[in-house]
Amino acid sequence: MKIHKNDNVMIISGNDRGKSGKVLKVFPSDSKVIVEGINIRKRHTKPSQKNPQGGILEKEAPIHVSNVMLIDPKSNKPTRLGSQIILDEKTKKQKRIRVSRVSGEMLQ
């Protein structure tokens, strides 16, 4: 999966189309991600020791990774991702990095 934790992504389909946020958690086995402030769901909870008041809690639900696109750090527009193999100077080993298709800039 090409989307990683702490990436800035834009939602390209669904009710939250056009919104952007930071990836909080990644579920590679399910191909889903949780994005900050996106796909908010309400849960009605009884009072408990953790939450003595109870009530309605709002939290982010997972969204499929095909519905998000990484934001290019240079142009602030959604971009596809590619990969490039470079030689690491310290270890002299090959290393695969993510590259933006729009600007060609390397991503961490």
Image: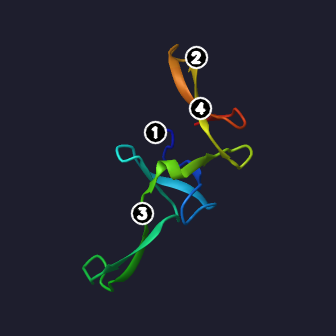
The residue located at (67%, 44%) in the rendering is 72
Q: Residue at x 60, y 61 (%)?
A: 17
Q: Residue 86 location, x and y as percent?
A: 58, 20
Marks 2 and 1, Cα distance to the nearest angstrom?
A: 26 Å
Q: Please, what is the three-letter code of the amino acid marked with disc 3? A: Ala
Residue 82 bears which disc, if any?
4
Q: Position of residue 31 (x, y in %)?
A: 41, 46
* Residue at 25%, 80% in the rendered image: 48
The residue identified by callout 2 is 89
Kindly report the distance in space between the C-alpha atoms of the residues bearing marks 2 and 4: 22 Å
Outermost residue toward the left in this view: 49
Name the foreground residue: 89 vs 9: 9
Q: Farthest residue toward the front?
A: 14
- To which quarter of the image does residue 101 belong? top right
SS for tag 3? loop
Give the CA distance from mark 4 to mark 3: 27 Å
Residues at circles 2 and 4 in contact by the CB criterion of under 8 Å: no
Picture quarter containing residue 29? top left
Q: Earlier in the sequence, mark 4 or mark 1?
A: 1
Residue wearing tag 3: 61
Circle nearer the viewer, 2 or 3: 3
Q: Secondary structure at mark 1?
A: loop
Q: Amino acid at mark 1?
A: Met
- Could you classify mark 3 by the number of other residues whose Cα lies within 10 Å: few (under 14), some (14-19), or many (20 or more)? some
Q: For this rendering, which residue is in front, 53 or 40?
A: 40
The residue where tag 1 is placed is: 1
Position above or below: 56 against 18: below
Image quarter (top left, top right, bottom left or bottom right) of the C terminus: top right
- SS at mark 4? strand
